[in-house]
Image: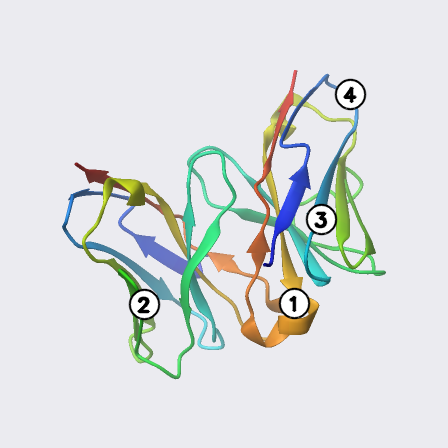
Amino acid sequence: GAVVSQHPSWVICKSGTSVKIECRSLDFQATTMFWYRQFPKQSLMLMATSNEGSKATYEQGVEKDKFLINHASLTLSTLTVTSAHPEDSSFYICSARDLERLSSYEQYFGPGTRLTVT
Amino acid sequence: QQQVKQSPQSLIVQKGGISIINCAYENTAFDYFPWYQQFPGKGPALLIAIRPDVSEKKEGRFTISFNKSAKQFSLHIMDSQPGDSATYFCAASRGGNNRKLIWGLGTSLAVNP
């Protein structure tokens, strides 16, 4: 149980274009979803926290107009990287908290999406 | 300011040995301390987690030791295997803020056969 999927697993796009990454909780309802980016050999950096039906809360220094997050349902959140540039190339990972297991404090992680901007 | 400090940055252990990774935290409001394992190109996976009401938790070969007064916690991997070679992250969270995790910088573990 508690499976989180991401799509696509990897994507290559040209500079200036936008790319959308999906994060789905497959067997539970996610009250809260988190989006991270990770550069090679570095730790996870939280970008934003989203709750279903609410605007996302972005971490300091993260451009909310560049990284658009939509949490339209209890099982789906999307991250859109707008006008992507090579410096946006990174590994993007989502995680989710189970609505029915909030007392466990656990976050379930997706497999990540590798974005390369050429 | 790094709220969760992790050491060492890298670790090499012989097969069958004990791997020990340490973390220290600043915020006494933290009340949940998980350890994650991450393989290259994959998302992190929860290994084991502890709350401050216990000093030790063991699951199979993995043990967390927690020292509340010292604000430190550590991961012990007993009988380390080559398949344990991965990056390990400690983290911490507190109530509020949707329980967002504060991460250590990670430890790259290599277990030699």
Q: CA distance from mark 1 to mark 2?
A: 23 Å
* Circle 3: residue type: Arg
Q: Within the image, what quadrant is residue B38 found in?
A: top left
- Foreground disc of the pair 2, 3: 3
Classify mark 4: helix, strand or loop: loop
Observer-nearest of A106 and B104: A106
Residue A94, disc: none
Give the answer, above or below, for where B26 lies relative to A62: below
Q: Are marks 2 and 3 on the same chain?
A: no
A104 displayed left or right of B59: right
Residue tagged by mark 1?
A: B98
Percent x, y of residue B79: 18, 53
Q: Are marks 1 and 2 in contact (CB under 8 Å)?
A: no
From what the image shows, is residue A115 above or below residue A31? above
Could you tell me how far apart the alpha carbons at marks 1 and 4 are, in whole angstroms? Answer: 33 Å
Which residue is tagged 2? B73
In the rendered structure, the answer to whether residue A86 lies left or right of residue B51 reads: right
Q: Do circles 3 and 4 both sit on a common chain?
A: yes
**How many callouts does the rendering have?**
4
Numbered disc in front, either 1 or 3? 3
To which chain does the residue with label 4 belong? A
Structural distance between the alpha carbons of marks 3 and 4 = 26 Å
Q: Residue type at mark 2: give it.
A: Phe
Residue at which label 4 appears: A16
Circles 1 and 3: CB atoms closer than 8 Å: no
Q: CA distance from mark 1 to mark 3?
A: 18 Å
Circle 1 or circle 4, nearest the eye: 1
Which residue sits at x=20%, y=57%?
B78
Q: Are marks 4 and 2 on the same chain?
A: no
Measured in 3D between alpha carbons, the distance from the residue under mark 4 to the one under mark 2, in whole angstroms, is: 45 Å
- Give the residue at mark 3: A24
